Amino acid sequence: MKKIIRLKRPYINPKYKFMFEKGYIPYKYNILYGGTGSSKSFSLIEKLVDMCIRYSTFDILVVRKYATTLKDTVEMPWLDMISKRYINKMSGIGLVEGRDYTYNRTLKHIKFSSGSIVRFKGYDNPEKLKGIDNVNTLWLEEATDFTQSDLEDIQDRLRATPPNNHPWGTELKIFLSFNPIFKTHWIRTYFFKDAIDMSDEIHKDTVNNIVTTFALKTTWRDNHYYNGQYKDENLRKKMQEINPRKYGVQCNGNWGVLGKLIYENWEVINCNKDLSTYDGISYGLDFGFEHSTAFHEIAIKDGDIYVLRELYKPKLTANDIMKEIKRMYPNGYSNLRIYADNARPEVIEEMKRSGFSGIRPCTKGANSVLEGIEWLQDRCIYIDESCVGARNEIESYQWEKDKKTGVRLPKPVKVNDDAMDSIRYGTEGFKNNTNVRIMFC
Ligand SMILES: Nc1ncnc2c1ncn2[C@@H]1O[C@H](COP(=O)(O)OP(=O)(O)O)[C@@H](O)[C@H]1O
Ligand SMILES: [Mg+2]
């Protein structure tokens, strides 16, 4: 490899400087956690690229739980770092693909001309890690997406035998980076002592095992290059008011603590029914029989949510549901953009065939319940006086309690949640609409 130097002396954020000191050797577990935008990912990529360029022995595996997120959140930042922050001393230009490194888009790896390699994998399917065993550096990005057994299984599969001249020794080195979303998360009990020092706004944790584990907590304030929304003090105040848990996690990097109630950011009012005054309208439908079927007309304006009309009744057949909705919309129902529970495709199809052309199944993913709830928690929810089902549910919609400890877990209690589901499904229509102004996203 031709001699490579840095493009310019980069600014290394002070809290990460130790990683760039001569002779730095990571611990077995290296935890980079804290708020959003604190340079966790950037600093680690910079360090690892640096090692790959200078040494021939690095075999790095970067894993995200979901393969679909790899490209934007992992591969692109690595390639960006390689192409923008380094320069080949001989040619005077940045690292060149094909000469200084090769990037295999299909197999998802970057091979450096030094001999070092970094591979990117999704862990949706553990089988994908088969055949990879020479890895000596593992990075779980957004580690809170993984379970404890995911970490243990991945570790078990990797049997690193780096050569003696490998600068980080012969033991597998593991990096975990994440936002500390919930205090009840296994990562906290696994790596940290139970007590948290909360005397400052930024709480302090202590690791369980100081021999194997190193933890660095950072927030956006530690990132010299931070250019995001938390710089705005007014927005910070508003965010703290509307969603204190998320503010604590993303802005201050503290472990998220759940209160009893899922939504506290709501109010019952007499909503304006003139749909033309809103930025967007959408409809949600959750099917029930013993429980209520819940259907809601939802509007968005300036990022706030308005629940305008509802159907909320048990013992409705598909036919009954259609009759009721037709009655609610005597001037036409066929274009209502209804996001319906995808667990009942046959009812959705029946409604479509009967003229509800705008109905579609909602999308559900691994984290969609929590993501949907967080999206709603970030805004004010105004419920019209007439929507009794939604009003009753939202008052008591709560997080499940751990039976032993009494601590609230990030799972909604599945009782009286029909309207809550219907409203959450309905908001899908706003998330895909880029014309809608969304706060805090
Ligand atoms: N040392 C640095 N030099 C230049 N830009 C940086 C540096 N550290 C962080 N940044 C910028 O800050 C942004 C946020 O950092 P990132 O690593 O994505 O935060 P986190 O992973 O903690 O959420 C990056 O996208 C990058 O643009
Ligand atoms: Mg990151």
Image (spheres, rainbow, N blue to C red):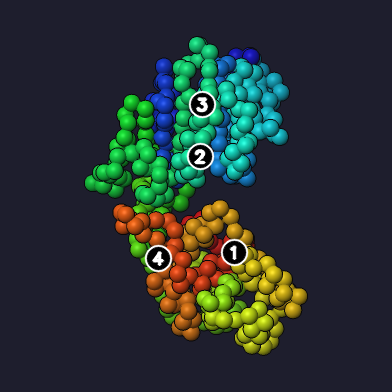
Residue 25 versus residue 91: which sits nearer the camera?
25
Query: Quick one: SS at disc 1?
Result: helix
x and y percentages locating residue 204 in the rendered image: 29, 41
- For disc 2, the neighbor class at 10 Å (few under 14, some 14 to 19, many from 20) is some
Residue under label 2, please give it: 150
x and y percentages locating residue 171 in the rendered image: 46, 21
Three-letter code for the amino acid on which mark 3 is drawn: Thr
408 sits to left or right of 45: left
Q: Nearer the viewer, mark 4 or mark 1?
A: 4
Quick check: can you spot residue 378? no
Mark number for residue 398?
A: 4
x and y percentages locating residue 386 in the rendered image: 48, 84
Picture residue at 53% right of the left edge, 77% below the top: 290
Residue 2 versus residue 386: which sits nearer the camera?
386
246 sits to left or right of 122: left
Three-letter code for the amino acid on which mark 4 is drawn: Gln
Disc 1/disc 3 C-alpha distance (Å): 39 Å
